[in-house]
Image (cartoon, rainbow, N blue to C red):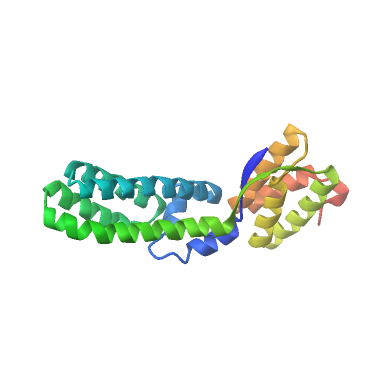
Amino acid sequence: MVLWIMDLGLLFRKLICIDGLDIWEGLSRVRCNRQAYADNLRLFCEDAAAQTAALGAALEGEVWQACAQAAHALKGILAGIGAWELSRMALALEESLRRGDREACHSGTGPALEEITGFIAAVRGALSAAGEKTKIRQRASVDFLEEKLGMLQRACSAGASREADSLAGELRARTFDDPATDAFVEKLSVYVENLDYDLALKSIEDRLPKQEVAV
């Protein structure tokens, strides 16, 4: 089975350093699901790149309606991930385009495109640093599962988010040749990604043999 492996802890440490990105606003739109936000950022990079290219081409041909449509799309795409300042820049550009203010369009579009393109590159850089391209899930034993669950239990109990993220990623990168176990690991990983350690601990406690549950 193929999947995307993402170090969410590293990703957010990179994202918080990007000027103009309000990650808390972006997270609020996906109920603080960090994996969902990472997925949104990947989609953002694709959509924003397409719209900036469309805007540049439309500006070159002075097709003002197409320029305005691309600026409008960028406004929404940027707001959706929490890039407020750039979204407002796109809004101002859209308004000047709809007014037909050619001088403002030509003078404002270049700098806007440069800033947005740089921002997209920064987000892509964060995703690239924190994520590995697709991997094949390796088979693992029940003993491996129980060992990692014990370690994850201790990490969640201590609130060690970096260690918990890493352990959840290790488990998610394995298959146990049992659909129910694979589904359990997927759900547990989501709990860890959402920092919902109470549910993660309850799931681990229910899964581990009673004599191995940490006190």
For image coordinates 17% across by 45% down, the residue present is 64
Q: Position of residue 92 (x, y in %)?
A: 21, 55
Q: Position of residue 130 (x, y in %)?
A: 57, 57
If the image is split into quadrants, where does the N terminus sit? top right
For image coordinates 71% across by 51% down, the residue present is 170
Residue lying at the far right of the rendered structure? 211
If the image is split into quadrants, where does the C terminus sit? bottom right
41 w.r.t. 161: above or below: above
Q: Residue 204 vs residue 25: left or right?
A: right
For image coordinates 72% across by 48% down, the residue present is 171
Q: Quadrant of residue 114?
A: bottom left
Viewer-side residue, 57 vs 210:
57
Q: Is residue 85 visible?
A: no
Viewer-side residue, 39 vs 158:
39
For image coordinates 79% across by 46% down, the residue present is 145
Residue lying at the far front of the rendered structure? 61
Q: Position of residue 196 (x, y in %)?
A: 61, 51
Q: Quadrant of residue 85?
A: bottom left
115 w.r.t. 175: above or below: below
Q: Position of residue 40 (x, y in %)?
A: 47, 47
Q: Residue 59 vs residue 119: left or right?
A: left
